[in-house]
Amino acid sequence: MTDTPTVTDRTDGDQRRIVRERYADIATDSDGCCAPEPDDDSGCCDGTDSTTGDADVTARELGYDDDAIDAVAGEANLGLGCGNPQAIADLDAGETVLDLGSGAGFDCFLAADAVGPEGRVVGVDMTPEMVEKARTNAGANDAANVEFRLGEIEHLPVTDASVDAVISNCVVNLSPDKPQVFREAFRALRPGGRLAISDVVQTADFPPEVTRDPGSLAACVAGAATVDALERMLVDAGFEAVDIAPKDDSETFIREWADDYDPSDYLVSATIEARKPE
């Protein structure tokens, strides 16, 4: 009998398929993203009771305040993520922002408010169902300065040196080629531009049952890298002023991501910041 492949044994295509299928289900689930799959005894939302579907509760746990939550209309807040990249992005009026793995558009609409009508926000997501949902939400939010594009974060559909800030919320860990993600972010940024993302980092070795579980990859667990590995990737991509700051209080919601083990034994949420040289 062939062993179930671990995360590192799966092809890049396998990993993308697993992630795309999971988030397509989330985007099209009429019960909301917090409804568990029929054969899954856990919810897909970070820290939210899968029977309530209360994405607002999750957003507060991740660091969004009530003003931010109330500012976004429609079904953009899916209760996904592991932090609040808006808190570290320090966006200014008139800037152009790129969101990696933009989902239903929640962070894009908040960024649009921050950069104002003279600014611009581009969201990129590889799941067609998510892009469709985000475009619908753009209408609900009257977000004329937000655009959603279908694409992979390893191959961004944006021109060189065209954005001031790259944000993302718990998406880079899902990529099978994280160094390429950072190289693409570097390419897209203007000189002096900045990277400001929330993601999970690995703090201990994963047991085999985690690395062999496709669900653990799509649930932002098994694909996480260590702080040292991420720092090397960012420096190799050309970034400077790299700062990765783990958030110890994130174990409160991370431990809710699985029912049969405690993900907080192996993960912590972190803010990841870096800058492209002038």
Image (cartoon, rainbow, N blue to C red):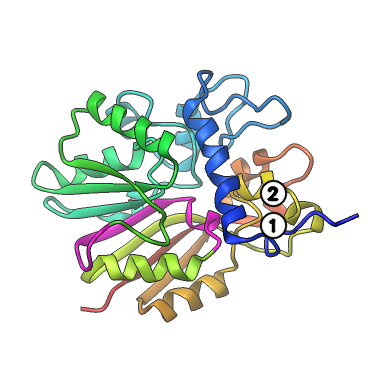
As shown in the figure, which amino acid type bears the numbered disc 2? Pro
Mark 1 highlights which residue? 266
Mark 2 highlights which residue? 263
Q: Position of residue 25 (x, y in %)?
A: 54, 31
Does the magenta run of residues contain 207? no
Q: Position of residue 248 (x, y in %)?
A: 58, 55
For the point 50% across and 66% down, which residue is it? Answer: 178
Residue 194 shows in the view? yes
Does the magenta run of residues contain 174? yes
| Quarter of the image that includes the C terminus | bottom left
As rendered, which of 143 and 159 lies closer to the eye? 159
Q: Position of residue 167 (x, y in %)?
A: 34, 54
Is 11 drawn above or below residue 78 in the view shown? below
Q: Position of residue 230 (x, y in %)?
A: 51, 70
Q: Quadrant of residue 114?
A: top left
Q: What element does badge 1 sit on?
A: loop
| Quarter of the image that includes the N terminus | bottom right
